[in-house]
Every structure is written in C-alpha cells, then in structure tokens.
Image (cartoon, rainbow, N blue to C red):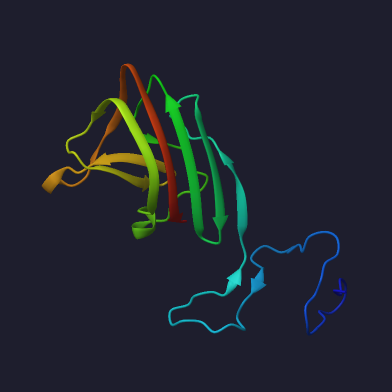
Amino acid sequence: MLKTVGNPSIRSGNQTILNGNLVIGTSGKGIDFSANSHSTGMTSELFDDYEEGTWTPGGAGANATGWYTKIGEIVIAYCELKNNSLSITGISGLPFAAGAGDSAIGAFFGRARFAGIFDGVGNEFRIRLLGSEIRFMTNGGLAGDANATVTTAAGGIVQLAITAIYKV
C-alpha cells in the first residue's frame, strides 16, 4: 500500500494500485527514471507529460478528421481528409505548434490521391510544418521550396492522410 499523506515513504519491491489511477498532482513532476543508465547528451529522465485527443484540421473542408498523441516533447498528429471541392495550400490547427528549426521539419507518412490539379513550380511534393500548420510545398529548384496548392478539378476528388511526428 502506498502512503498518501505526510512524509514520502521509501519502499522496496513492486507497488500495486488496486483501484484508480496514479495521479501526479504538481505540474512539471512525473516518473523519474534517473536510476537507469543513460547516454551522453541526455537532458532529462523525467516522464512528465502524456496527452491524447482529437483535433479539427482547419481549411480542409467538412470531411476532415484528426487525432494526436503527445509524449513529452514529441507529438504524433494524424489527419485525414476527403473532399470533392477543395483548394488548399496547407492544413491549419495542429494541436501543438512545432518547435523552431529542425524540429519543425518532422517526419511525415501518408497517402495522397489528387484527381485534379496540383499547382506548384516543381514535381517533388513536400510537406513542412510552420507553427501549427502543415504546408504543401514543391521543390523550387535553386530558388528553394515553393508553396503549392492542391485544387480539385471538376468532378475530381482529393484524398489525403498524413501522420506527422514532430517536436514541440
């Protein structure tokens, strides 16, 4: 049995909570893994944040859904859209803004089908994070990346599913 009031108790062996959750009642506190060995460059061994939920991808039309999981500083955000009439340069409303610099690049997985017009200055499709927005880009050659617009043609359809993994 865990001690719940007074001075912290020191116990050895496993502890079992028969009913309920282990609640960390103070912000910035969590589970401390400092007893484990760590590699050079380690900056923290405190697990102090976990969250999951849904988000609404903005600018993506009515048929857009999203969910996310945040573990520490890492966010996994998924969105899916399917629309017959759409013209977008990105999807807004990520549940957390991407960090600056390299953390704003992230890793992306997904599938896309564009039965319409893909308007950009190059042939290579890219996705970048800008704050709380997923931006569509094309390779602009020597000039660098350029904004791209995904637009459906008459009778066309856009289907897009993206999983973004990034640091806040």
**Is residue 2 positioned above or below 21 on the image?**
below
In front here: 154 or 130?
A: 154
**Number of on-image labels:** 0
Q: Residue at x 50, y 54 (%)?
A: 75
Splitting the image into 4 quarters, where does residue 48 fall?
Answer: bottom right
Residue 107 percent location from the top left of the image? 38, 53
- Pick the quarter of the image with the N terminus: bottom right
Image x and y of residue 2, in percent: 85, 74
Left or right of residue 89: residue 47:
right
Residue 94 as seen in the image, left or right of residue 152: right
In the visual, does 140 lie left or right of 109? left
User: Does residue 19 appear left or right of residue 96 in this picture?
Assistant: right
Residue lying at the far top of the rendered structure:
154
- Against 82, is 33 above or below? below
Q: Is residue 93 visible?
A: no
Can residue 70 be seen at all in this image of the molecule?
yes
Q: Where is residue 68 in the image (x, y as percent from the top left)?
A: 55, 47
* Residue sitting at x 40%, y 30%: 159
Q: Residue at x 62, y 58 (%)?
A: 50
| Rendered position, 38 above or below 136 | below
Residue in the picture at 29% in, 30% down: 149
The answer to whether 11 is drawn above or below residue 27 in the figure is: below
**Can you give x and y, in whole percent of width and height, for residue 40 in the image?**
43, 82
